[in-house]
Image: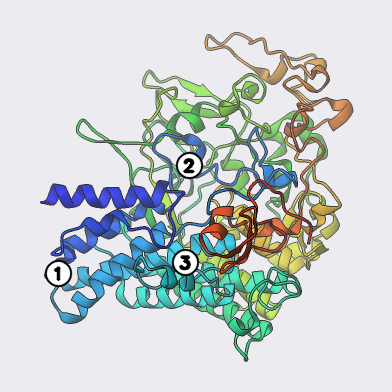
Amino acid sequence: MKKYISALLIGASMAGLTSCHDYLNEQPESSLTPEKFFSTADQLGAYTINLYGNFPVHDQYTWSLGTFIIDNNTDDMVGMSPSTQWTPGLWKTPTGSGWSFTFIRNCNYFLDQALPKYEAGTISGNSNEVKQYLGEGYFLRAYAYWNQYSSYGDFPIVKTALPDEEDVLMEASARQPRNKVARFILEDLDKAIELLPENAAGGKQRINKACAQLLRSRVALFEGTWLKYHKGTALVPGGPGWPGKAADLGSDFNIDTEISFFLTEAMKSAKAVGDKVVGSLAENTGTAEGYSNATTCINPYYGMFTEQSLEGFDEVLMYKTYVNTSDMNITTNIYMQFQRNGGNTGWTRGLVNSFLMQNGLPIYAAGSGYDEDWENQGVSATLQNRDSRIQIFTKGDNSVTAFNNDGTTEKWAMGWLVNSSSEMRCVTGYGVKKGMIYTPNPGAHDHGVQGSIVFRATEAMLNYMEACVELNNSVDGTAQTYWQALRKRAKVDQDFNKTIAATDMNKEALGDFGAYSHGSLVSALVYNVRRERRNELMAEGHRMDDLRRWAALDQLETNPYQIEGMKFWGTVYDKSAGVNPLNLKDSDGADATVIVDVAGGTGNMSDPTISGPYVHPYQISKNIECFDGYKWIRAQYLYPLGQAAFRKTATELDDKGTVVASVVYQNPGWSMIGGEAPTAL
């Protein structure tokens, strides 16, 4: 029976991960569970743990889906192939439904089955664990809604697994205003917070109270800033051109009141987490290599992203563990791809330039100590005297990438910039080292066992800082404490007011989309809070959501942006400078021969006559769609519902079978017909 139940639950979990064709009336595989299931604490825990696969973690086999590369296709990191979102006209309405209800329905099914038994007192086992797993159920439903709401905005609110009855399903398909969806998520998280323990059974492998408080702050900040910066557009409830029904808003709806509510709630939930960890952040020794040998981590801050067990890090609230033993092999491909090569990613020059000097000044400010000639001397020289985070998380010239068993080391070679397949390319020359562990045999696939952070408390500190500044236009005592703690660990002067006074927004805008909101430059105070967030959370999967909620891409409609990497032409890496191109070495230590070829836009390096001295990864080939730069249209801030969503809820078709009217409305600017691109708002 246990094996039977387990198989059913794994099936339910995999459906939540892979199905693209589900809709409100599809039965979850878990409906086959025997009636006596959900009668013990262990059974509840077995069901919820199989929904954990919906969290972003290091992918087991496919590197391109793992964390530390999830911020590709932003202004922070890029891969070899740009996203279609940056070339308006290429991102089109899908033919499928687009949105998904599988994860939500599996959570609803759990709560439908378990809550009545809990209230009747018929669930056996440890009572604290029963409460924990019910809390997980509420948390997981909130997270399922977060995944959909953060992409689509307005969304149906369905609190139970629905029967297969057309009238019921049609009514339930109606979208609710996004602020109501966000409030519903907060309510679920309130229930989760009440039930979840501080220290969960299962340790940091399972959801705890702080995870719920952190997610609550994330959702509240997302909605509060979305409403604030998209106010006056069709992308907020009640805005001009908003496709929803005014009656759904309620007679007392006021967008400014909603903004204040969500920002206040973000501060409250974030403080509950931040206050507990601000005094025990992982220490940063400033050691760039992180490890002294293959097993000894000498920089705890670096090790927080590479160690196998993260139980000892206070700011890690939850993580996924990997194991490679004789009887179990749950590993990740991040081991090889990040250690040995470029991993099809790279920091952008814009991100690198956003990092302050250790004295707290921007690199362009008088007295900063930055020398523009450093860029001619290579990556390591460029990063000297900078915020420690960009130094320890970037592969410098000849930095160690592996400590071998025979006492030798393997070192980073810039050849991955030009001499590799797309999946291994160091796209910009600024090699990403965040998450790179130092172990022998760097060429081995699927051997990675470092823990994958799911929730990190540092985000809560940043959420509080931002919500405080957005709500009050000032930094209160708590925000100041958090900010100084983060800058201290980064080995940057803690006087953030000095940084604010020296900030030139026109110069920051050259490399940071976060300098804008709704087409205008933000204040230096708001920007520097965003800068801190960008620098601390780089490569952790937050960037695109941040840019969307800030409405930070409007300026790209008329002013395309060209992604830049390191300086190449005229530097120590340039063959014409009379040195070994890219300073490469073969495995035997001899100089390597790598040809850098612009080939009129068809080679392996951007042409300096077109791109100037810096690497422009999207100007290497004239066949790359965004050769002329990143562009954007406002409709893309929200994802489109797919054509199938309208056909399944249609109330009227024309003589050609095209949907004329539906219970469900499309997001502004997007077509209801699959394969059509959005129009400008």
Check if mark 3's residue and mark 1's residue have beta carbons within 8 Å: no
Q: Is residue 148 visible?
A: yes
Q: Nearer the viewer, residue 264 or 282?
A: 264
Q: Residue at x 35, y 65 (%)?
A: 164
State the image coordinates of residue 161 (x, y, percent, origin top left).
34, 68
By what rule are the colours in the image chosen?
rainbow
Q: Give the answer, above or below, for where 588 lies relative to 127.
A: above
- Distance from Cα at disc 3 to Cα at disc 2: 20 Å
What residue does disc 2 label?
A: 66
Amino acid under label 1? Asn
Q: Residue visible at 14% across and 67% down?
A: 39
Q: Residue furthest right?
A: 609
The kind of residue tagged 2 is Gly
Spatial distance from mark 1 to mark 2, Cα to Cα? Answer: 35 Å
Instruction: Identify which residue is drawn at 53% across, 79% down.
Output: 265
Q: Which secondary structure, mark 1?
A: loop
Question: Which residue in the structure is indicated by mark 3?
Answer: 215
> Which residue is label 1 attached to?
126
